[in-house]
Amino acid sequence: MSENDILKDCHLTQRFKASRSVHDFMHHGEPLTVNTKAEETMKQMINYQKTGITMKLAEISIASAALAVALALTGWSSTAAAEEPIKVGLVLPFKGVYANLAENFASGWDIALDQYNGEIAGRKIKVFREDTEANPNVAVQRATKLMNAENVDVLAGVVSSGVGVALGQFANQQKVPIVLGMAIADVITGKNCGPYVIRTSFSAHSLTSGFGRYLANSYKTASTLGPDYAAGHAMIGGFNAGFRGDGGEIKGEHWSAFKQTKDWGPILGKIQSEKPDAVYSFYAGSESVQVVKQYANFGLKDSIPLYGDHWLYDESLWDAMGDAAVGGRFVTTNALDVDNEANHLFIKAFKKKYGKTPDINAYLGYENALPLFKAIEALGGDVTDSAKLVKTMRGLEFDAPRGRYTFNNDNNAVLDKVYVIEIVRDGDKLKPKLIDSIAGGSDLSGCNM
Amino acid sequence: MDFFILNILNAMQLSMLIFILAIGLTLIFGLMDTLNLAHGGFYTIGAYAGSQLAINGSFWLAFLVSPLVAGIAGAILQRFALQPLASKGRSTHLDFALFTFGLLFVIMGGAEIIFGSAYLSIDAPAILKGGFAISGVTFPYYRVFVIFLGLTCGGVLWLLIDRTVLGAVVRAGVADRETVCTLGIDINRVFVVVFALGCAFAGLAGVVSAPIFGIYSHMGASILVVTLIVVVVGGLGSFKGSFWASIIVGTFETMAQAYAPDVQLYGLYILLALILAVKPEGLFAIQRRIA
């Protein structure tokens, strides 16, 4: 790109911005105190637009530069910024299978928004909710719509890994920042990483490899059980790496056909004949209910403990699992019992607003919004430079409900600690009990940024 | 060997569950020539009705009443939607398939609105908790119950079709609908009864599978494919075909999972393609007079 081209680009952008401000001003029709020079320049520009006279490039740049200077002098530009909200596209699977999860995630998001009173560095935060239908194609369409129709500054949310991979690539192409709040596929901040993608949750590998290492301290052998698709392989693969890495032996890896298998009887029979010391399993939703219940029905629960994560033993599934869930132990990034001020604060605010305790998805939603807001704050509300926003976020270090919160160089949140929870009976209800806090695992390498 | 016996039992359990589900679809298709794609919806209705009844009552109350609820819903659908549709001339397979397929999504959406997207379950009755051991491997009693229930349903339906007046009318209707009408039988009434019965079986499958599979709003869509495979493989409308096709599908699924997990995902479809290539009309095609 020659210097001339760059200048041209620069001028065009300025012109666009200036005319947009003028347009906004006209549109809102609010009284403004601007000095006559600025007013004149604006009138001139509107006139040009109305009459359709095309100005030469140089003239545009002079006019817009004059306008910019004039506006800066009167302080009008900061007033304009105050009126222009920061637009965030919150893309989540609001309908269908993940509706419940998405709703809880958004509740957590709203708590963070409340803490800032919906305004950061003098700019309002305007959230546009968009349904991804947990479908990568749909998600990209909706993200495109958010960019074109609503002119969003940043995208956030995202539950499914498939959507995360697609939107991550979309963000890098479109140079729009995306702050992923779940989407745990390793590749997103691994092979596919880029300067516009940042993940506030964690990678599959970092959650389960730490847990595998931890269980290798107590058990010599284990078998694993998971759905035969990308997320299943990422989660189970992480566990196996951790468990083997610390001297454990994996007796059998069992895979079920994703969304097809309903009866785990044959696999459970095989596990019983393998006689491992423990079983680790990853599933989500209806498959979690089926696996945990059938595991108990086959009498395995009493002889071989079934370990999982906060998806296998998802709190919202406990009612459906009933007794089968009691005594189940799982690894998670957040827990109610974690004793730090940020956690207490969040739980209190959540209880006050929703009358219940937050589940993992609410935590992840809150911790999705928090770093974004802190980065916007650090930038004084200026989010025009997308890469800078992501870079600023990466440099953050603060206390969150999960503990000390930092990012690594791949733009992925680091799991300083993860928590081991046991499901215990409390009268008629089940409740989570924190039994251990352990070091989190590391990401799979592969990012070349 | 023990592992193999365990798998035979598992295969029987899954087969019988699929059979209870498929039998209603077969019944309706056999007599009425209507492919009721909302079948999964009645399965859903049965399961949710069961979950509500089981909260205050017991599994057995849910077991008895849920099929009635699904059956009544089915009767209403046939009497007030499908029959008027047919009498207005919209009675092709495509008309009914589209209408009932849409209805399936209405029921799924309705379940989500009323009960939310949370997962529910029904506890197996106390008497069926636990299991018996086959050399260190426990086989749950509830699964034994499912096997017996499937066989019982097959037996009862066989008696009903083969030994009762209703059965005779149904069989006659399958063979030659016009002649049945000329004999002074109100075929529309028979249709309502048969449709209700078919939906009641779907409801029964919903409540019986709840302790094993759980209850969720989109449960009806997830079983539709396997049910359709059974009905197609068995021969559209054939009871005997449904029974054997259920056993083939259930056994294939179980054995694939046990001995060749890699073929699980697509194996069933290859089997379907092979059977249809050799016998395009299914294993036990019914003779339907072409008018």
Image (cartoon, coloured by chain):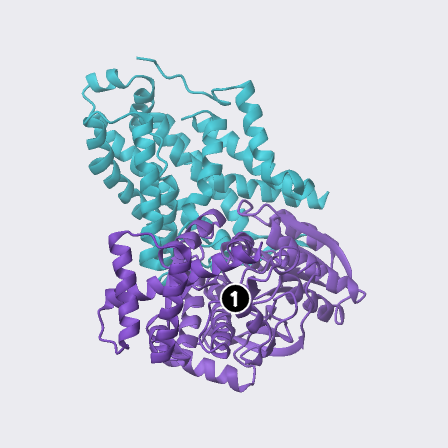
Mark 1 burial class by Cα count in 10 Å: few <14, some 14-19, many 20+: some
Q: Tell whether A393 sits left or right of A108.
A: right
Q: Toward which corner of the image does residue A424 lie, by quadrant?
A: bottom right
Point out the image quarter for the N terminus of chain A. Answer: bottom right
| Chain depicted in purple | A
Q: Give residue A402's quadrant in the image.
A: bottom right
Question: Looking at the picture, which amino acid does disc 1 mark?
Answer: Asp
Q: Is residue B74 above or below residue B158?
A: below
Viewer can see residue B167: no
Q: Give the residue drawn at x 27%, y 44%.
A: B73
In this picture, residue A186 sits left or right of residue A382: right
Q: Residue furthest bottom?
A: A341
Front in this rendered view, residue A395 or A157:
A395
**Residue pointed to by mark 1:** A323
Q: Position of residue B57 (x, y in %)?
A: 36, 61
Looking at the image, residue B284 lies above or below residue B117: above
> Disc 1 is attached to a residue of which chain?
A
On the question of residue A427 being in view, the answer is: yes
Q: Which chain is cyan?
A: B
| Residue A205 point in image, percent of width and height | 66, 62
User: Percent x, y for residue B125?
Assistant: 46, 58
